[in-house]
């Protein structure tokens, strides 16, 4: 495994989670594997992640990246309240947050939903047919940034 | 166990006593009212896919034994369709033999679930998969089948789509020949042996099945592949074998069964996610390939 954070010799940490109303877990496992292959240490908070738990782990662990994956079709509706909780804990801007999966039940609603999520401060949205490819590309870029120790700039 | 591990963060130490209390209460009130109690374990699904059937059969049986010990008179034992026709038929046969041996004193009933993972997106593929599940249920002697529909890959089905799927299932179940293939027989022997090893090892932990289940997860005698629950050790792994198409162990952790012969499947770390995704997509790909679906419809 590549060591990405040159200064400390430690792998950068990514926190993987989903919305409190999404009981799917296989997507989180897939995301975790991809991140590990890119050299991240991953804390996977599991299905139906309570937003308070997510906020506390971000506060306590200071990850380099937060990945929220939801595949129940309601992510676009549920994610804003997750972000509100992170705001309440004042951890909203501690790490870049990216989201992905099946975020709307109607594909026609996705472009607007993605714009709104970006406006709410989400660094990147990976949904639709090429989601995995785009996510991989993002990770490749972010690994480059991490290697030059610019974790804070990644994706934003 | 079967609802706790996939869907809840509560510890087994908290939920087992709660289930004990609920089952006792129900059994007592049914006794007073002279009604029958029947409950279904979800042990045949666990995370819905990529779990070798021996563990599904073991957990279903152990949960049924838990309910029987609390005075519940009837239990449905479930099993979810996997990625191989013969392996699934074998799993239902293995479950039958274990029921005969261990659950003869209560009323039992086998339920088969049409595939719960990534569903074929093509109408022909979805139909072929649903029809295959009905034939497996019929040949394996399940009393009940929970079907999916052709809409499964994209959303919530309409009433019409449900009716159509029920029609396919009825037709395929009625048409299926009762003959059990040699491969299904071989799977039955293998699944029965593995499941018995797990059941026996767990029951040896305590005379109380609930305490035995708690101890089994703590010690890794039961360990559900890919399950993220804090009480699950997470040392086991499984995949869809590219050769046989069956769900097989790649890592057995502390399970009381022989280590897998197929460890070569996880050759390098870098191949892990690619292999995992191939396994997740295996059934959808198999049935969405129109040629395969056609052959499956013709030959099974």
Image (cartoon, coloured by chain):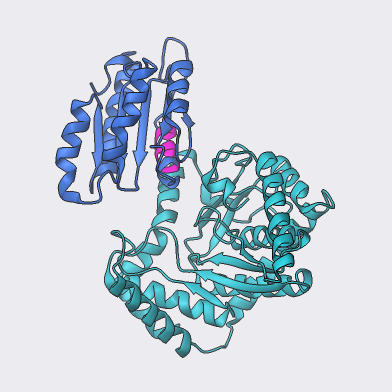
For the residue pair B4 and B227, the one nearer the viewer reads as: B4
Q: Quadrant of the C terminus of chain B?
A: bottom left
Residue sitting at x 45%, y 49%: B276
Residue B201 picture location, percent across and down: 79, 54
Which shade is chain B? Answer: cyan
Side of A63 where A154 appears, left or right: left
> Residue B11 sits in which quadrant?
top right
Residue B134 picture location, percent across and down: 47, 78
**Does B189 sit above or below residue B262?**
below
Residue sitting at x 74%, y 71%: B106
Residue B231 picture location, percent across and down: 64, 39
For the residue pair B185 and B265, the one nearer the viewer reads as: B185
Side of B94 where A1 appears, left or right: left
**Does A104 sit above or below residue B24?**
above
**Does B160 sit above or below residue A38?**
below
Residue extending furthest toward the top: A7
Residue A134 picture location, percent across and down: 25, 38
Start-end of magenta stretch: A29-37
For the residue pair B29 and A7, the one nearer the viewer reads as: B29
Magenta region, mostly helix, strand or loop? helix
């Amino acid at each position: 495994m590549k060591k990405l954070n040159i200064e400390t010799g430690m792998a950068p940490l990514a926190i993987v989670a989903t919305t409190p109303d999404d009981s799917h877990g296989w997507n989180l496992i897939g995301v975790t594997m991809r991140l590990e292959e890119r050299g991240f240490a991953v804390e996977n908070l599991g299905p139906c992640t309570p937003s308070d738990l997510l906020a506390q782990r971000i506060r306590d662990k200071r990850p380099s990246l937060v990945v929220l994956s939801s595949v129940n079709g309601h992510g676009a509706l549920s994610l804003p309240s997750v972000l509100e909780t992170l705001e309440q804990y004042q951890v909203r801007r501690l790490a870049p947050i990216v989201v992905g999966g099946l975020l709307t039940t109607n594909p026609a609603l996705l472009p607007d939903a993605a714009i709104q999520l970006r406006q709410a401060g989400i660094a990147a949205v990976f949904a639709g047919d090429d989601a995995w490819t785009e996510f991989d590309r993002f990770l490749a870029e972010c690994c480059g940034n991490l290697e030059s120790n610019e974790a804070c700039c990644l994706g934003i | 166990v079967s609802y706790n591990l996939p869907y809840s963060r509560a510890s087994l130490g908290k939920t087992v006593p709660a289930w004990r209390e609920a089952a006792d209460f129900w059994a007592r009130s049914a006794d007073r009212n002279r009604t029958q109690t029947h409950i279904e374990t979800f042990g045949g699904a666990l995370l819905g896919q990529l779990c070798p059937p021996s563990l599904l059969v073991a957990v279903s049986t152990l949960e049924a034994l838990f309910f029987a010990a609390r005075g519940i008179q009837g239990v449905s034992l479930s099993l979810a369709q996997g990625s191989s026709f013969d392996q699934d038929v074998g799993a239902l046969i293995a479950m039958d033999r274990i029921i005969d041996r261990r659950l003869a004193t209560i009323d039992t009933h086998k339920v088969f679930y049409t595939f719960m993972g990534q569903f074929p997106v093509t109408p022909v593929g979805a139909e072929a998969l649903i029809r295959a599940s009905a034939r497996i249920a019929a040949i394996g002697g399940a009393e009940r089948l929970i079907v999916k529909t052709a809409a499964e890959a994209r959303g919530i089905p309409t009433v019409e789509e449900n009716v159509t799927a029920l029609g396919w299932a009825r037709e395929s179940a009625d048409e299926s020949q009762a003959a059990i293939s040699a491969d299904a027989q071989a799977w039955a022997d293998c699944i029965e042996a593995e499941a018995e090893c797990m059941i026996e090892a767990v029951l040896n932990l305590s005379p109380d099945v609930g305490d035995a289940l708690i101890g089994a997860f703590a010690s890794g005698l039961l360990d559900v592949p890919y399950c993220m629950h804090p009480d699950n050790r997470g040392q086991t792994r499984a995949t869809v074998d590219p050769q046989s198409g069956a769900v097989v162990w790649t890592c057995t952790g502390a399970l009381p069964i022989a280590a897998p012969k197929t460890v070569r499947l996880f050759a390098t770390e870098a191949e892990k996610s690619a292999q995992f995704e191939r396994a997740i997509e295996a059934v959808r790909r198999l049935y969405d390939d129109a040629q395969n679906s056609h052959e499956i419809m013709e030959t099974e």
